Amino acid sequence: METSTALLTDHYELTMVDAALKAGTANRRSMFELFARRLSGARRYGVVAGTGRLLEAIRNFRFGDTELEYLRANRVVNDDTLDWLANFQFNGNIWGYAEGDVFFPGSPLITVEASFAEGVLLETLALSILNSDSAVATAASRMVHSAAGKPLAEMGSRRTSERTAVAAARAAYIAGFSATSNLEAGRSYGIPTMGTAAHSFTLLHDSEREAFEAQVAALGTDTTLLVDTYDIDEGVRTAIEVAGTGLGAVRIDSGDLPVVVARVRRLLDDLGATNTRITVTNDLDEYTVAALAASPVDSFGVGTSVVVGSGTPTMGMVYKLVARQDDAGEWVSVAKKSQDKASVGGRKSVRRSFNAKGVATAERIYLGDGPDGATEGADTDGREVLVPLILDGAEQPGHTGHDGIAAARERHRERVRELPAVAMSLTRGDPAIPTEYR
């Protein structure tokens, strides 16, 4: 078994299981939903990311000797609960929005049907993965649209924690980024990796020319030379003198980019390097990418902004109990009524409606039999949104591994094309389509 994920959770989840076992309610069939009450940052749509990682984490959500000894030594739960945890394996059902899909306020991104004890144990694990990954993917999706077809590379590993960096690269790739600088993301998820040299490599040498000569000797003329360590214009001239007019690209990491990029393009063309590409970095986000999209930039490298969700590092998702069975086995809707934190109880299914041109018009959430039901929404147009992820404890194929990532990437491309034009606005505003409860 791989490293256990069972302690990637909060203390109170185990104490709830402890109390529910003692009260005899732990095995009561329950339904939990993970959703966002609103789109953080007033975005027009959100992007589902992290589903595949969550399924992989649930596989390893097992309490081995090490985990049990920690709980015992710290008296987190009693001995009877420790015995229950020792045999824990999730055997319930999970439906959800497929990874790469878009979502809106109230969308039940993950629906968990299981015993109360099984379902409640997954709360923190699900929220920690989907909140972070979806925030990155949402920001990345906006950047991809802003780039107007020009490729973007994720370069933010040094701006977040070491494991989050790998997950962020995965989320950005699903949302349309073309590569990452993170080698572990390349190894783990098959994402193309890229990178050449930083300013320290230039400063290591006695001159910029010597640094360029060393890089070209090692990597060939198709490399990318960083030309802004000293004077940008002089750096471009030196780069072409060293590598010739067949130089692959130059990178600019400072300055007034729209002005500098235009000047560098003219200079490269004057030097005969008409096919040498220009890539820019320098604290880009969706707004600066949009401002540069019409300039002669060929590609973008985005670091800090993408891995922190461009100012929205979490999507504000919550995980709530929405239904449970009573002693007679009948489903009872339950909901939190707190001010500004109310939830909508009941088992639900979801359909997305479209107009005659195939543009999404509404997210329709039907209260009724739930995601496995056959009645609600049966006579409506549109497409069913929820897909089975785990059934009776068995993970469903197609959502994990390299194939799952490739499918999520293509799915995202298709789903974004279905959204109305207002979804692509970078201004703060209402969701692109309304959420309707039926």
Image: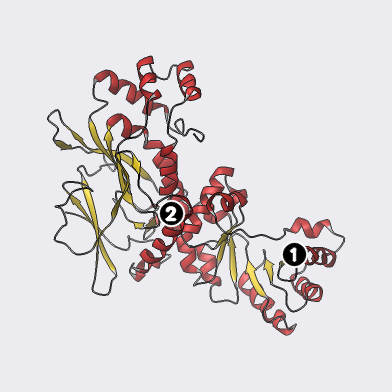
Query: Between marks 1 and 2, how big is the CA–CA gap?
Result: 33 Å
Q: Nearer the viewer, mark 1 or mark 2?
A: 2
Q: Is residue 289 above or below residue 64?
A: below
Q: Amino acid at mark 1?
A: Leu
Residue flagged by tag 2: what amino acid is it? Gly
Any part of residue 36 in sight: no
Q: Nearer the viewer, residue 276 or 255?
A: 276
Residue holding disc 1: 219
Asked if residue 341 is positioned above or below residue 117 in the image, the reply reads below
Instruction: Say left or right for 53 vs 379.
Output: right
Residue 271 horizontal/vertical position (percent): 75, 82
Where is mark 2, residue-wise?
Answer: 404
Secondary structure beneath dot 2 equals helix
Q: Position of residue 24 (x, y in %)?
A: 24, 21
Q: Residue at x 39, y 41 (%)?
A: 126
Classify mark 2: residues with Cα within 10 Å, few (<14), some (14-19) or many (20+). Answer: some
Compared to 242, does 139 lie above or below? above
